[in-house]
Amino acid sequence: MNIRQQALETLLKINYDGAYSNLEIKKTLSENPMKDEDRRLFLNLVYGCLQNQIYLDYIIKQHSSRPVNKLHKEVSEILRIAIYQLYFLDKIPNYAIVNESVNLAAAVQPQAKGFINGVLRNIMRKIEKDGKEFKFENWKNEKEALSVRYSVPLWIVHKYYETYGKLEAEAIIPLLNEKPPFTIRCNTLKTSRQDLIENFEKLGVEAVPGTLSPQAIHLNNLGVFENNIEDTFLYKEGFFVIQDQAALLTVERLNPKPGQRVLDMCAAPGGKTTYLSQLMNNEGEIIGRDIFPNRLKLIRQAMRRLDCSNILLEEQDGCEFLARDKESFDKILLDVPCTGLGVIRRKPEIKYHGTKEGRKDLVKIQSTLLENAVNYLKPGGELLYSTCTINKDENENQINKLLLKFPELKVIPDKNDRVYTYTSPLMDGSDAFFMCLLKK
């Protein structure tokens, strides 16, 4: 099976079978060893088509006699793969892209060969005549133009405008198709940030301190470690965790102290849980809970690697209140399940999946988790609520409802005197997170 056929199979599983892009890509690569050049092309095709799907479908619509949603799934994916190459890759000649696409169609949908050939040749003629640039000036509605060019559904574009304002939203949306920085957290239970930076430099990896967190490091030019950073002795010895700065800020904002009793209500996969342990210097007690036992295994593995010894893991549905834990925690971290609109760069399929009903169900779950968290908190205790979304219904609106129900709660502003804290890719390349600190 050639690289384009591998990309086709992977995209079909993500777009039509509900597979997660990161897991499906990892599975494909593990089952199909590839040369570095082929691996790069495979990743480029899969992520490129996912990131630009609305734009690619817009181009298909301009040159096809049939609506995109009426095309057979293999046909639409073959066209997307081809158009992505025509518009975004420069090293492959256009005629070769068309020929490869027709050959791919012959293998999976032979009756569509002529149709695919005709559509792609129409697009080639359009490129030769007008070039590849997207002409924003031809659009009267700037939000619709951004939605199409950067393949962000219009309702999500509106959410970004609502949360960040016009100027920031217009700066952030193009970044949602960019590769995020490769960021790690230094494990100070075993080393220091400076020593870790020097160790990476000895391996030939450029390591740059992050600007948002005192333990963050950006790894640039990974070289031979681009696809196997977890095979390095630095990883195996537990010197670092792969983690975005926004996630680090949630734990730092809660600021747990040695000796305290802390609850992480939605702990898996454990990055924040182990950072709590790190900041507490393994002193005190952390209860880490999650509803999925297989995800708790991931935390146990991380605990062993990182030498975190003050964490007790429990399989527990956070929506079920445990009366025995009423008012028994000094600090609580509640990083809830959410729509994930702030991590689109990492999971581009998030943009296209989900329903209004599904989002409403998430809001209900978040509300229940929040109320339980407040009841677990000691008087004088602090609760950090966080999401990786920019949807106000999951963020500010949740807090406002909670404050009406629990008037004894007070919001603690951040260092910039903001009641609600948002991060974004404009802040040293971080993910878009929401966080709010509450005191009982």
Image: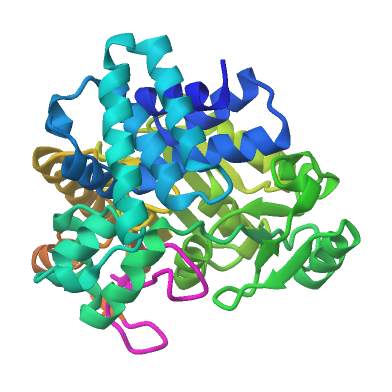
Instruction: Tell me if 392 is positioned left or right of 243 in this view.
Output: left
Residue 269 visible? The answer is no
Seen at 51% across and 59% down, the residue is: 180
Instruction: Tell me if 354 is positioned left or right of 9 in this view.
Output: left
**Residue 323 colored in magenta in the image:** no
x, y percentage for residue 94? 47, 41
Residue 33, compared with residue 226, is above or below; it is above
x, y percentage for residue 224? 80, 46
Seen at 36% across and 58% down, the residue is: 132
**Prevailing secondary structure of the magenta residues:** loop
Residue 364: which quarter of the image?
top left
Instruction: Tell me if 234 is positioned left or right of 213 in this view.
Output: right
Q: How is the image coloured?
A: rainbow
Instruction: Tell me if 32 is positioned left or right of 199 in this view.
Output: left
Residue 323, compared with residue 380, is above or below; it is above
Camera-nearest residue between 316 and 216: 216
How many labels sit on residues? 0
Residue at the right extreme, as displayed: 202
x, y percentage for residue 298? 57, 34
Camera-nearest residue between 137 and 280: 137
x, y percentage for residue 110? 33, 10
Q: Which segment did they paint magenta?
A: 413-440
Q: Quadrant of the N terminus?
A: top right
